[in-house]
Image (cartoon, helix red, strand yellow):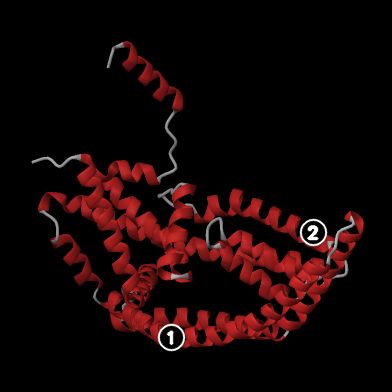
Amino acid sequence: MKLPFFAKAAIFFVGIYALLSMLYISRTIVVPLIFAIIIAIVLHPVVDFLVRKKFNRVLAIIIAMLLVFVILAAFGGFFVSQAGRFGESWPVLVEKFTGSLNQAVASISSYFDLNPQKFQAWLAKTQGELVNTGTAAIGRTLVALGNWIVLLLLIPVYIFLILLYQPLLLEFIRRLFRAQEQSQVNEVVTQTKSVIQRYIVGLVIEAALVAALNTMALFLLGIDYAILIGILGALLNVIPYIGGLVAVAIPIMVALATKSSPWFAVYILVAYYVIQLVDNNYIVPKIVASKVKINALFSIIVVLAGNAIWGVPGMFLAIPLLAIVKLICDHIEPLKPWGFLLGDTMPALLMIKLKSKKKRKAGV
């Protein structure tokens, strides 16, 4: 018996809701595991290289993980020290920023003959809330950081075991499918590994280049905490479409709080716009671009959905996971329309119109 369309649609949406609910409930288990799988895929060529050089597989895995740990520890230590200095100056920056806004409101009010008292009262209240929010946020961050440290300790264990049992896991995936489907399964697995490796490595290179450009621009403009803000902007830029807006807002706020002229905010906006042009037109196409192209609409949707389900880690994981979903859809015949929908290949509208006209003439 063939189900009607509305029944299929109802089953589909119920299934999506159930899947998202399970992902949300199991986020403390799933998120570290997905991070571990992605990192293991990226480290796989390094481990294979060491194994070919006659290293024991266990030793090769340990060496690869130690290299990553040293790099991350060096970066994390530097970033935390810079963030600590910025956190100590946060109340002063808030005070200066609200002072600049008070001056701007006074100037606008005198020009337009408005009563600024209500707005200034709101500013005073907002200033207190910003300082208190900053202090409370630090406390909440420390609690959340403690929880995440426990989870992060699991990631190296997951990575080690995934790399160690990689042949077993791949053989399990192959045995799930029939013999005539083995070539297709091998192709999907190979392309998935290639997409993730190219995407993550390209993302790291892109973040380093954008961080260098951001820091250089802020240094030339004499903005305080240029290194921290430049790196933070590069990390936020990894989040498609949304991160770039937040990344430019932070240095603008610092400039308004620390500089005597508001023109510095305009200079920062122009500098970040030029950097974004370079990033979007040269860095991303040459370095980050992979075999799987995702259109902007679904990129934004999955980033927001990732944030709703898994928070900030979900925003980082959204695009690579969607790329894998599209890759799978492109290789399964009934799911190919969904793969086409997620992609950025635009059909020729003229051809669609001509086909519809032909159908109307034929009386279809």
Name the amino acid type tagged 1.
Asn
Residue 273 coordinates in the image, percent (x, y): 69, 54
Q: Residues within 10 Å of mark 2 (few under 14, many from 20)?
A: some
Asked which quadrant contains residue 105, the reply is bottom right
Name the amino acid type tagged 2.
Tyr
271 left or right, relative to 135 = right
Asked which quadrant contains residue 35, the reply is bottom left
Which residue is found at the position 41% from the left and 49% from the top? 291
Which residue carries the number 2 mark? 267
Dot 2: element: helix
Which residue is found at the position 75% from the left and 64% from the top? 217
Q: Residues within 10 Å of mark 1 (few under 14, many from 20)?
A: few
210 left or right, relative to 169 = right
| Quadrant that contains the C terminus | top left
Residue 335 coordinates in the image, percent (x, y): 26, 45
Mark yes or no: residue 198 visible. no
12 left or right, relative to 281 = left
Circle 2 or circle 1, nearest the eye: 1
Which residue carries the number 1 mark? 147
Which residue is found at the position 37% from the left and 80% from the top? 155
Which residue is found at the position 67% from the left and 69% from the top? 230
Residue 221 coordinates in the image, percent (x, y): 81, 66
Q: CA distance from mark 2 to mark 1?
A: 40 Å
Asked which quadrant contains residue 136, the reply is bottom right
Residue 177 coordinates in the image, percent (x, y): 14, 56
Mark yes or no: residue 270 visible. yes
